[in-house]
Image: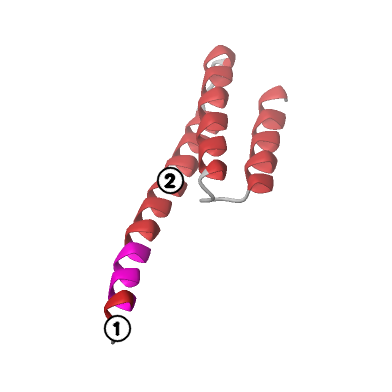
Amino acid sequence: MPTHRSAEKRMKTAEKARQRNRRTKSLIRGAAKELSVEKDAAKKSEKLKKVSSILDKAAGKNVIHKNKAARTKSRLSKTIKK
């Protein structure tokens, strides 16, 4: 356990950030899964926009790296085009 007051505070803020990051990553995985399961092509393109938006926001907040967001978007769009 932390001894200093600042270390206690840092521990609390780190836990809040960890929970926030987990929630965002879970949202990304869920949206990507929805996209891969979808059968209708029109709905797939809509869901791709949604997933791209989520990925860009996560990359902007440094939850995931910007290159990972780009790579994931690229892979998802490639699977849709097949």
Q: Which residue is mark 2?
A: 24
Q: Position of residue 82 (x, y in %)?
A: 73, 25
Q: Position of residue 31 (x, y in %)?
A: 47, 35
Q: Amino acid at mark 2?
A: Thr
The residue under the point 53% across, 18% down is 46
* Residue 74, quarter of picture: top right
Q: Main secondary structure of the magenta part?
A: helix
The residue under the point 58% across, 18% down is 45
Q: Nearer the viewer, residue 4 or 39?
A: 4
* Residue 3, quarter of picture: bottom left
Side (left or right) of 39 relative to 73: left
Side (left or right) of 2 relative to 69: left
Instruction: Reply above or below: 69 against 50.
Output: below
Instruction: Reply above or below: 39 against 53.
Output: above
Q: Residues within 10 Å of mark 2 (few under 14, many from 20)?
A: some
Pointers 2 and 1 in contact (C-beta within 8 Å): no
Secondary element at tag 1: loop
Q: Residues within 10 Å of mark 1 (few under 14, many from 20)?
A: few
Residue 8 within the segment the image draws in magenta: yes
Secondary element at tag 2: helix
Residue 56 within the segment the image draws in magenta: no
Q: How much space separates mark 2 and mark 1, taking CA atoms? A: 31 Å
Q: Position of residue 79 (x, y in %)?
A: 68, 31
* Residue 59, quarter of picture: top right
Q: Which residues are magenta?
A: 7-15
Q: Which residue is mark 1?
A: 4
Q: Amino acid at mark 1?
A: His
- Sequence-wise, the earlier of marks 2 and 1 is 1
